[in-house]
Image: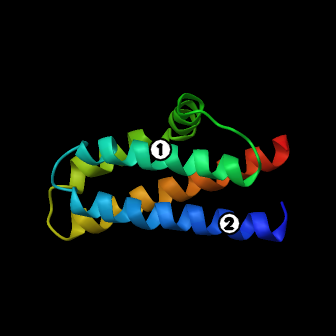
Amino acid sequence: MTQDQRESCHIIIHGASATAAGIGGGLAQLPLTDSAALLPLQIAMVVSLGAVFDQDISDTAAKGFVLGAGAGYLGRGLSQLIVGWVPVLGNAINASTAAGLTEAIGWAAAKKFDQDS
């Protein structure tokens, strides 16, 4: 991965992760509603990362990657059900898990695209 590609990936991934944190934190008291907003965000992130490596990734392929790499959705769902309803604490935990999962998916995609190019 070149330095320019790394910087582009950094901007894309951290931007998506920050947005995911906002979504996760804002929707913590509504179980699983944030997943409907996070999935399109993560798909767009993977498509954008593919473009950094000159790979044309379809939304369907990106969705498959996100769902395959996002086994953490189960853990996120459980943490949200357990503490998501608690004001402030639930928001903080949901925000950090949404951001962390998005970050992990993004860097996994960047690594895969770098290896494939």
At label 1, counting other C-alpha atoms closer than 10 Å, the crowd grade (few under 14, some 14-19, many 20 or more) is some
Query: In which quadrant is the C terminus drawn?
Result: top right
Of 54 and 104, the residue lying toward us:
54
Question: Amino acid type of disc 2?
Answer: Ser
The residue tagged 2 is: 8
Of 7 and 108, the residue lying toward us:
7
Residue 17, percent across and down? 47, 62
Query: In which quadrant is the N terminus drawn?
Result: bottom right
Q: Earlier in the sequence, mark 2 or mark 1?
A: 2
Question: Amino acid type of disc 1?
Answer: Gly
Q: Quadrant of residue 83?
A: bottom left
Of 88 and 60, the residue lying toward us:
60
Question: In this view of the protein, can residue 105 be seen by the observer?
Answer: no
Question: In this view of the protein, can residue 23 be seen by the observer?
Answer: yes
Q: Quadrant of residue 95?
A: bottom left
At label 2, counting other C-alpha atoms closer than 10 Å, the crowd grade (few under 14, some 14-19, many 20 or more) is some
The residue tagged 1 is: 72
Foreground label between 2 and 1: 2
